[in-house]
Amino acid sequence: MRDILQKEVERLSPYYETKQALMLPVLRKIQQANGYISPESEKMVAELLDVPLVKVREVTSFYNFFRDKPVGKKRISMCRTTSCWLRGGEEIANYIMEKLGIGEGETTPDGQFSYESVECLCACENAPMLSINDRYFGPLNIERVDQILEAEGKA
């Protein structure tokens, strides 16, 4: 992986003013390959970009699209902002977790589904809503959630 990342740094360097500015695309490359960013990967990025490890950790912990542990193949993100909650989002979130048999931030034992609440999915007109990986669904009700999960392989 280190060789692949080194080539990525070399390829992207002409487009960035500093090595530190390469952090987001390099971290994204790691996550695409592994599904998450391990502490070992953070250390490798710090070394490749010649930045303190704490700077890498600040980035990976700040952005919610970076994961620090393996997640399911289908990552369910449920919006928890006011518009979704006012329209039944909490009930739907609890229903999903119960149906999957997992809690917040957990992954099903078969590795198929992970569940997380997120601050906003930026589609309040579809409240309540969720995303599965990069696909958005809403407005939701219990029946619609059942249809979505069935289509995703969770009957």
Image: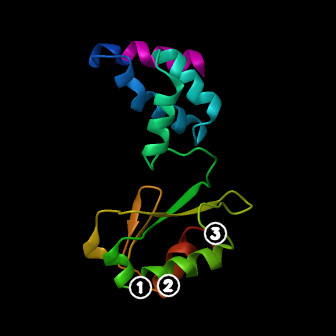
Residue designated by label 2: 91
Q: Position of residue 86 (x, y in %)?
A: 35, 84
- SS of the residue at dot 2? helix
Q: Position of residue 130 (x, y in %)?
A: 43, 69
* 2 or 3: tag closer to the N-terminus: 2
* Residue type at numbered disc 3: Gly
Residue designated by label 1: 88
Q: Which label sits on residue 103?
A: 3
At 36% from the left edge and 77% from the top edge, which residue is drawn? 84
- Looking at the image, can residue 108 be seen? yes
In the picture as drawn, the residue positioned furthest to the left comes out as 125
The quadrant of the rendering that contains the N terminus is: top right
- SS of the residue at dot 3? loop
The reply to whether dot 2 and dot 3 touch (C-beta < 8 Å) is no
* Residue type at numbered disc 2: Glu
At 63% from the left edge and 72% from the top edge, which residue is drawn? 154
The reply to whether dot 2 and dot 1 touch (C-beta < 8 Å) is yes
* 1 or 3: tag closer to the N-terminus: 1
At 49% from the left edge and 43% from the top edge, which residue is drawn? 61
Locate residue 148 relative to residue 128 in the image: left or right.
Answer: right
Q: Is residue 132 above or below residue 84?
A: above
Q: Which residues are magenta?
A: 1-11
The quadrant of the rendering that contains the C terminus is: bottom right
Q: Is residue 10 magenta?
A: yes
* Residue type at numbered disc 1: Gly
